[in-house]
Image (cartoon, grey):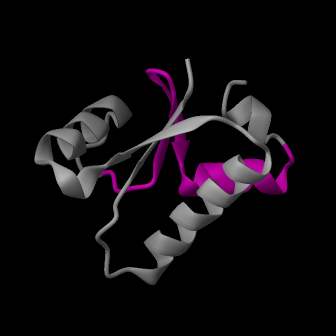
């Protein structure tokens, strides 16, 4: 299983872009393999993300380890501050 990040390539929000970039930068710097799914490419992908998070209003980025939900950006950021990202990502 690998890390899966739902993100959007089309967003007018600088905050969303910054959050996604921070997640990707961290994963790249630690050489953690991950896949991305762009919710802006298909409403089915967005619906799948929301169903898997259990929140019909969830927004990207959302992080999974396989089918197991890890959390959203704020949870990732907390894990980063607490130096518990590996546990957060269930690695």
Residue numbers of the magenta segment: 58-83
Q: Nearer the viewer, residue 67 or 55?
A: 67
Q: Nearer the viewer, residue 33 or 88?
A: 33
- Residue 4: x percent and y percent? 48, 35
**Disc count in the image?**
0
- Residue 79: x percent and y percent? 75, 47
Q: Is residue 81 above or below residue 56?
A: below
Residue 18 is left or right of residue 50, and the answer is right
Q: Is residue 18 above or below residue 63?
A: below
The residue depicted at 79 percent of the width and 45 percent of the height is: 30
Quadrant location, the C terminus:
top right
Return the residue found at the far left.
43
- Which of the 4 image quadrants contains residue 33? top right
- Residue 20: x percent and y percent? 52, 62
Residue 5 is left or right of residue 27, and the answer is left
Residue 8 is left or right of residue 47, and the answer is right
Q: Is residue 89 magenta?
A: no
The residue depicted at 69 percent of the width and 35 percent of the height is: 88
Quadrant location, the N terminus:
top right
The residue depicted at 20 percent of the width and 53 percent of the height is: 41
Q: Is residue 69 magenta?
A: yes
The residue depicted at 49 percent of the width and 22 percent of the height is: 66
- Residue 90: x percent and y percent? 68, 25
């Amino acid at each position: 299983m690998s890390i899966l990040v739902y993100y959007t390539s089309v967003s007018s929000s600088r905050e969303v872009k910054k959050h996604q970039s921070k997640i990707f930068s961290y994963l790249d710097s630690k050489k953690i393999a991950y896949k991305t799914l762009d919710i802006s490419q298909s409403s089915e992908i967005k619906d799948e993300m929301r169903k898997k998070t259990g929140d019909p209003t969830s927004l990207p980025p959302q992080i999974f380890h396989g089918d197991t939900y890890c959390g959203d950006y704020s949870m990732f950021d907390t894990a980063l501050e607490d130096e518990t990202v590996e546990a957060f990502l269930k690695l």
